[in-house]
Amino acid sequence: MIIKPRTRGFICLTSHPEGTAQNIKNQIEYVKSKGKIANGPKKVLVIGASTGFGIASRISAAFGSDAATIGVFFEKPAAEGKPGTAGWYNTAAFEQEAHAAGLYAKSINGDAFSDEIKQQTIDLIKKDLGQVDLVVYSLASPRRTHPKTGVAYASVLKPIGETFTNKTVDFHTGVVSDISINPIENDEDITNTIAVMGGEDWKFWIEDLKAAGVLADGVKTVAYSYIGPKLTFPIYRNGTIGQAKNDLEATVPVLNNLLADINGVSYVSVNKALVTQSSSAIPVVPLYISLLFKVMKQKGIHEGTIEQMQRLFAERLYTNEPILLDAEGRIRVDDLEMREDVQEEVAKLWEQVTTENIEEISDIEGYRNDFFNLFGFNFDAIDYDAETNEVVQVSSISE
């Protein structure tokens, strides 16, 4: 079939198998260009492995240190006449490239919050790898069914305390407007968001993996967070999502205690603002990212998702130097984004930006391109007017 991008708001409803494969190949080539990561991980589990930071982590481990990888995710497979999700195609392309390079790579598709998928993962580790030495937790989901109680929770994106009003942009049209978001009405919104996006499921995973004996001595585990600038604090860091991130970060000492007897350690990495399916849904953030990209590209310090993860692995998690942590014990690979000179320039542009000048003073075109790249579109090497085979299998799942 011929597959073109179809969008609804911040969602792209279609994805292109050849384009997503090109995206994966580009990321692999970048990691290979940086050379091998000394003392990198060798047996890696990535939970939330199909898009964004998750697939970039898997690529960094596999092609940066020849690691065997198991990826867990929840994606829609391709079927005749119906393209699969981008994450499905990403994984198919990754496995093909990994196998061609002689690397072990298998995947599990299902609800990673469930005990069933946790057990399937444990069984696969026992059968094929024995143990893993790195566990990456990169789940992003709007809802979660609690595996112990069966209660279904849905996260919300709301400020706390008072209505938040600021600029936002429709990145498809470039129209800048004001948006107001009402605050939570009760603490249940906070509780629900923490239940979905906080640290409890990460803890459940590590508890189950350890109890099953599949964590190697000296294992590392890392989860991902974001802080951002003050202008996004009301909707992000000080809002419901921020409360969930606080909970995620507070899980680190709990896991460190749990892993102490096998010399394991846990980290939260605070990453840079990037174009992801999740970030595109947050008002204000696409406009901020468009301005941020303009400034960082002008300064020659811009990074995409794969650059972030390769640097996290090579310069933070697996370095011969002591791992640099901030005062709250977090790894910071948002350090370039949060540089004072960068934030000062973004703040100035924020005051100036309008519908009339956004194409000139921001990198909204770069934002759009990154967004469509997520779904396999806007790659020069791909002929989007040609027929493509939409039915692509993830080899390890179809076995």
Image (spheres, rainbow, N blue to C red):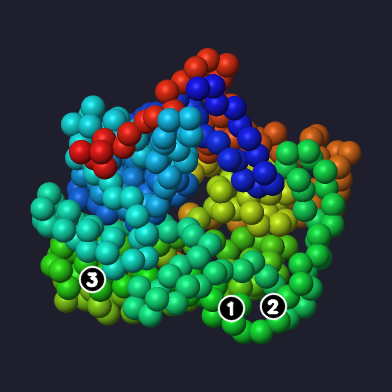
Label 2 is placed on what type of residue?
Ile
Q: Report x, y in % for residue 29.
A: 38, 29
Label 1 is placed on what type of residue?
Ile
Q: Report x, y in % for residue 7.
A: 65, 39
Mark 2 and mark 1 in contact? Answer it, CB < 8 Å: yes
Please name the residue shown 56% across and 69% down the image: 155
* Residue at the outermost right position: 356
Label 3 is placed on what type of residue?
Asp
Near mark 1 (Cα within 10 A), the count class, few <14, some 14-19 or many ≥20, is many
For marks 3 and 1, the one nearer the N-term is 1
Which of the 4 quarters of the picture holds residue 31? top left
For the residue labelled by badge 2, is the local secondary structure a helix, a strand or a loop?
loop
312 relative to 171, above or below: below
For marks 2 and 3, the one nearer the N-term is 2
Please name the residue shown 15% across and 69% down the image: 212
Q: Which mark is residue 208?
A: 3
Q: Which mark is residue 184?
A: 2
Q: Nearer the viewer, residue 394 or 211?
A: 394
Q: Report x, y in % for residue 74.
A: 40, 52
Near mark 3 (Cα within 10 A), the count class, few <14, some 14-19 or many ≥20, is some
Q: Report x, y in % for residue 193.
A: 54, 72
For marks 2 and 1, the one nearer the N-term is 2
Relative placement, left or right, of 268 versus 4 is: left
Which of the 4 quarters of the picture holds residue 365? top right
Whether residue 338 is visible: yes
Q: Which residue is mark 1?
A: 190
For the residue labelled by badge 1, is the local secondary structure a helix, a strand or a loop?
helix
Q: Compute the Cα span from label 2 to label 1.
A: 8 Å
Q: Compute the Cα span from label 3 to label 1.
A: 26 Å
Relative placement, left or right, of 277 versus 71 is: right
Q: Nearer the viewer, residue 112 or 181?
A: 112
